Amino acid sequence: MQVKEITNKDQWENFVQKNKKSTFLQSWNWGEFNKNTGEKIWRLGILHQNELVAVALVIKVNARRGSFLFIPQGPIIDPEIKNKSSIILKIFFDYLKNLGKKEKVYFVRISPILENTKENLEIFSQAGFRNAPIHMMHPEITWVLDIEKSEEEIFQNMKKTHRNLIRRAKKEGVEIIKSTDEKYLKAFYDIHMETVKRHKFIPFSFKFIKAEIDTLKKDNQIQIFSAVYNKKIISSAIIVFYGNQAFYHHGASSSEYSKIPSSYLALFEAIKEAKIRGKKVFNFYGIVENKPKHPWSGLSKFKKGFGGYQKEFLHCQDLPLNNKYIITWLIEESRKIKRGY
């Protein structure tokens, strides 16, 4: 087996999208998005007998607490060769060690798209990885909904409260507009910043989200669902469509119109759009369990009310490459303690 950089978009996308666990965080366009925001990236492929058997998008993150190589929800491994997955990971880990030293980073960080099992954790620990102090880089507990069922079945399987609120939003005259135009992005961001103040979390910059929209819309992989009430946008959801899934990536709602359940209708329209596009799963993205003080607590209840089930991935893993890693560990551990989750 050998590791090489993949430079052909079709080769990359054909491999990633055929995998049922395909995630937009390993898509070609997510790599382009990171390049457009100034990050250095590598699209690594592992070949066996000239056939691609695994890929991983690697991003060099230059943070104040120390630079590191980051692999978001990867690597993606061909499910047909499960018996060689541990060998593939070992080859990949060795390559990352050398690349990390060459790039003079403090550590390698991986958010694996692997189930949270003792066996999977053992693969990483044997290679020198340890649990990252950060709570998450990307969601480790997600909520997903099978949308291969009929629209009526999906609706009936929701909580009664959700069904009633969707009906009420329609009755109140809420309209959902689908667009990627900048005016809808600006409206989303205004509400997003209001949400940030309300829940006290660190926001994405407007430039960051605009770059995401501009990159993914080229292949019709993203859409803003804006809820309009009395000619004013009062909530928004940004949905990414990739592989066999639709991802609820960003959301925001105005407290001024909190009694108008527009977010419920917006998400239901997003689910319907995902079905039209032939997606099989609606991924509500991250949730939290048994953490009432966490800023995602209320949002988690909102997501789960649409029906579905929970998936849990292995905790984010760090591979220290030099003694400076302790700086990052101390900063992130103290932040976690301070936030209380």
Image: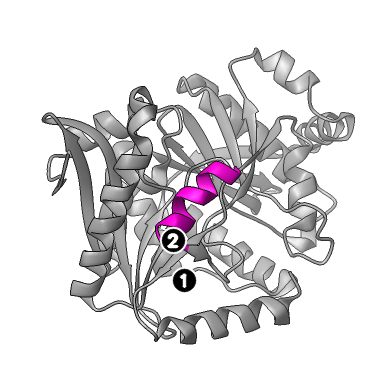
Q: Does the magenta stretch include residue 121?
A: yes
Label 2 is placed on what type of residue?
A: Ile
| Secondary structure mostly seen in the magenta stretch | helix
Q: What number is the disc on residue 305?
A: none
Q: Which residue is drawn at 41% across and 35% down?
A: 22
Q: What element carries label 2?
A: helix
Residue visible at 74% across and 33% down in the picture: 306
Q: Which colour scheme is used?
A: one colour
One can see residue 234 in this view: yes
Label 1: which secondary element: loop
Instruction: Measuring from the top left, give residue 340's x and y in whole percent.
Output: 76, 74
Label 2, residues with CA under 10 Å away: few <14, some 14-19, many ≥20: some
151 or 82: which is nearer to us? 82
**Residue shown at the point (78%, 33%) measured from the top left:** 166
Report if residue 111 is visible in the image: no
In the picture as drawn, the residue positioned furthest to the front comes out as 126
Q: What stretch is highlighted in magenta?
A: 117-129
Q: Does the magenta stretch include residue 177?
A: no
Is 100 placed left or right of 189 in the picture?
left
101 or 65, which is in the foreground?
101
- Would you say the residues marked 2 and 1 are in contact, meaning their CB atoms lie under 8 Å apart? yes
Q: What is the x, y in percent for residue 19?
A: 38, 28
**How far across and how far down the image is residue 21, in percent?**
45, 33
- Tell me the amino acid under the disc marked 1: Ser
